[in-house]
Image: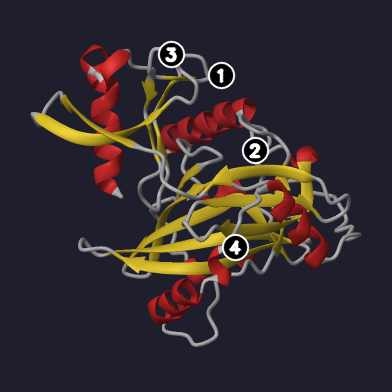
Amino acid sequence: MLLFCTGMANLQSMYAQKQPLFWNSEILKIASPNSERNWIYIKPALTIEPSSFFTTYKQAMNLGNNDEMRLIKTEKDNIGFTHYRYHQFYKGFRVISAEFTLHAKAGKLLTANGNMTLGLTQSPGIQKSRETALQQALQYFPAERYAWQSQQLEADYRAQQHSPAATLKPIGELVWVSTVAEGDLTDPGFYQLAYVFDIYTASMQGKRIFVSAESGVIIKAFPLSYDCTATNVTTNFYGVQGFSTRLIPGSNPASFNLWNDCQTAFVRTRNWNSDLTMAQDFVSGINNNWSAAASAATSHWGTERSY
């Protein structure tokens, strides 16, 4: 037993040297040695209540005094697990792309995975009003008519939401968002406070637009309307299966990559190629044919099916 305990301690020490920002003295008490920053395995001997995890083990998770994890959704699956999805807030405002999910069975926390943005020190400087920011967003995404200006679309939306007060007019939530377009979204130095607006035209083309609450400039924007193309591939194990890809804008001849925004969970399959610093998109040739990258397409299809 002494040899086993010593071996485990040495193993954890080795992992701590690889990930010093994750392996603090408190996380060592609860996490198994094979844990990582984005995927934590709780030591089997421990019984931890999911509802109190982020308050009891705030220091272990490297959360600061101004950080808070708020429960936003609870789901039960058909094999007895309950999944608790939390979102990170900093100084009272939601942090975009910072979510952590706790996985428990019979009330006992087993694993946790996700992303958090640690080390935020910014102050929420709000110089622009919500209405001013909205006007900036509308100038960025002009339309002859917006969805909330259509009585029919508004009526349909109220019926869908079962609320007479529901509206398609964007409200503008204040959030922390990274100014980085791609790559490491967890670097705290690139975060700004912004208003986020989901704007739809009367033809239901949409964009999610982030407007700086300090300067009023557009930080970034994403399409909300679907931009995907159906295709199929002979998978490695399950025969011919259909999945969705994205036509690469401006490509000539037409090329596609493994993006799927046709569902709630955006699925993107990339090739790390043993390089942990920069991933490349899988790109097909003409006709959206994926026979040359069947393994990647199989993974993409399998992920779509999981959601």
- 3D distance between C-alphas at marks 1 and 4: 31 Å
Disc 3: which residue = 252
Mark in front: 2 vs 4: 2
Q: In the drawing, what numbered circle is on residue 185?
A: 2
Assign a secondary structure to mark 3. loop
Q: Badge 4, how many Cα within 10 Å: few under 14, some, many 20+?
A: some
- 3D distance between C-alphas at marks 3 and 1: 25 Å
- 3D distance between C-alphas at marks 2 and 3: 31 Å
Q: Which residue of the protein is positioned furthest toward the bottom in this rendering?
A: 164
Name the N-terminal-most of marks 2 and 1. 2
Mark in front: 4 vs 3: 3
Q: Badge 1, how many Cα within 10 Å: few under 14, some, many 20+?
A: few
Assign a secondary structure to mark 1. loop
Q: Are marks 2 and 1 in contact (CB under 8 Å)?
A: no
Assign a secondary structure to mark 2. loop
**Quarter of the image where the N terminus is located:** top left
Q: Badge 3, how many Cα within 10 Å: few under 14, some, many 20+?
A: few
Name the N-terminal-most of marks 4 and 3. 4
Vertical comparison of 165 with 112: above or below:
below
Q: In the drawing, what numbered circle is on residue 278?
A: 1
What amino acid does circle 3 point to? Asn
Vertical comparison of 231 with 214: above or below:
above
What amino acid does circle 1 point to? Met
Name the N-terminal-most of marks 3 and 1. 3
